[in-house]
Image (tube, rainbow, N blue to C red):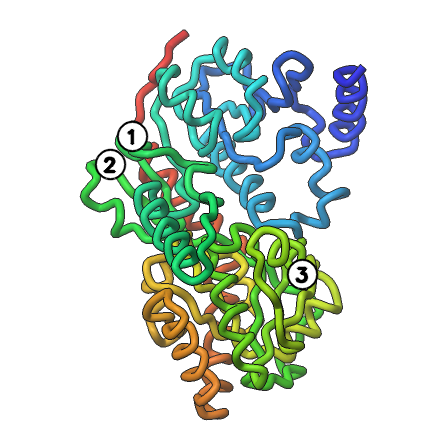
Amino acid sequence: MYEGNMLKKLKKYIAESRFAPLFIETNKYGNIVSNINLNLTKKQKHVLLVYLDMTEAGIQLASYYSKNENGALHTNRSELFQIINIFIQMDYCIDVCAHSDKRALEYIKMRQYDVIFGLGDVFHWTVNHKSAYKILYLTENPYDVSHDREKERIDYFYERHNRVLPFERTGKFFTKDEEKRVDAIICLGEPEYLRKRGVKVEHVYPSAFLNSDFQYDKCKRVKNNFLVFGTDGFVHKGIDLLIEVFNEHPEWELYLCGSGITKYVKNKLHLTIKSNNIHDCGYINIKSDKFLELIYQCPFILQPSCSEAVSTAVLTGMRHGLIPIVTHGNGFEMLGKERCLFFEGFHIKDIEFAIKKAVNLPDDYIRTKSKDIYQYANKMFTIDMFTLNMNCAVQNICEGLTYVNQG
């Protein structure tokens, strides 16, 4: 019954989409989308893209425009289409599947690929079982960096609250020493972590969204207002630290945007939000008036994350003129101190010091820095710039590759 309904859905969505000519493999092979750009009159290279973060890859591709508001849930939807287009322009025949869709492995076993690009469980399997040129899409810092830094945060939480927390982020998409088993890496984070690991590395900034109704001149920002956009991986992202700091500073306002924040703080962390200055805003759609309301009043966006890549949430804030205050080692160093402020450590005193410093900045300095960030980000973090940079990265890596599989 499930497979029959799924097939009907796929046919409906595909028929209505710009991807209508695809050949779709469903049912026992999961929801892999196969043979994009197939041309039977010539010899083509074949690439497998393993990236989507939900199992129903076919439905995501086919219903992108009608069901996903042009990708407003996350920039990775928009970016996937651009990656597909890059390989189309290189005349590859393309298969796409979700990183978690293990049913697709039966289909992948039968296929021969010249290039495999991606991350997650399906990609891990292909590294060990398929002959192809492997490109790891490293959307956060390497496993060992993430592991050590998340452990620091967990240990610090235990030191403060005598409670042991599990790892939330490390190992979810990337495994230990994975970079040693691939041929090349395209990273969104700090490339310096990879320079001495004996693998070809290309760096690309992700893209960010811009609310089309945003008008910079409408900003009436108060410098004690701070925004956090995206809270999944709570302790990994340092949201617990922010709550503890703002609990002690009722003169500052913290706006937290994400799903299930209050419930998580109470039930998982056993922390108390003591002050009315910490606002649980829930999930915020970037296209909404609520998003604009927050953007117009907050001059700073915070991310004291222990180990990620350059955050699309932070870049989205920057496209609206927000000044980022971020942790060292997550790829923001390349933007320089001209466009970022930094937490110099992850302890409570470090978080508190950085926020005090921001609040004490002169108003003219904040306005000038905000305008510069707004103009810079809207040149550098668009989907067009992502496409240009990703195309260069893929071309640099794949240039000169011969056919791995001749079958």
Disc number for residue 199: 2
Percent across and percent down for residue 185 are 33, 38
x 75%, y 42%: residue: 67
Q: Amino acid at mark 1?
A: Asp
Image side of residue 34 versus residue 174, left or right: right
Disc 2 residue crowd, few under 14, some 14–19, many 20+, Cα 10 Å: some
Reading the image, the residue beneath label 3 is 286
The image quadrant where one finds the C terminus is top left
From mark 3 to mark 1, how far is it between C-alphas? Answer: 37 Å
Disc number for residue 281: none
Cβ atoms at labels 1 and 2 below 8 Å apart: yes
Tell me the SS state at disc 1. Answer: loop
Could you tell which of marks 3 and 1 lies nearer the N-terminus?
A: 1
Q: Amino acid at mark 2?
A: Val
Q: Quadrant of residue 119?
A: top left
Total numbered labels placed on residues in the image? 3
Q: Quadrant of residue 287?
A: bottom right
Reading the image, the residue beneath label 1 is 183
Q: Amino acid at mark 3?
A: Ile
x 59%, y 86%: residue: 222
Tell me the SS state at disc 3. Answer: loop
Depth check: 304 or 293 in front? 304
Disc 3 residue crowd, few under 14, some 14–19, many 20+, Cα 10 Å: some
From mark 2 to mark 3, how far is it between C-alphas? Answer: 37 Å
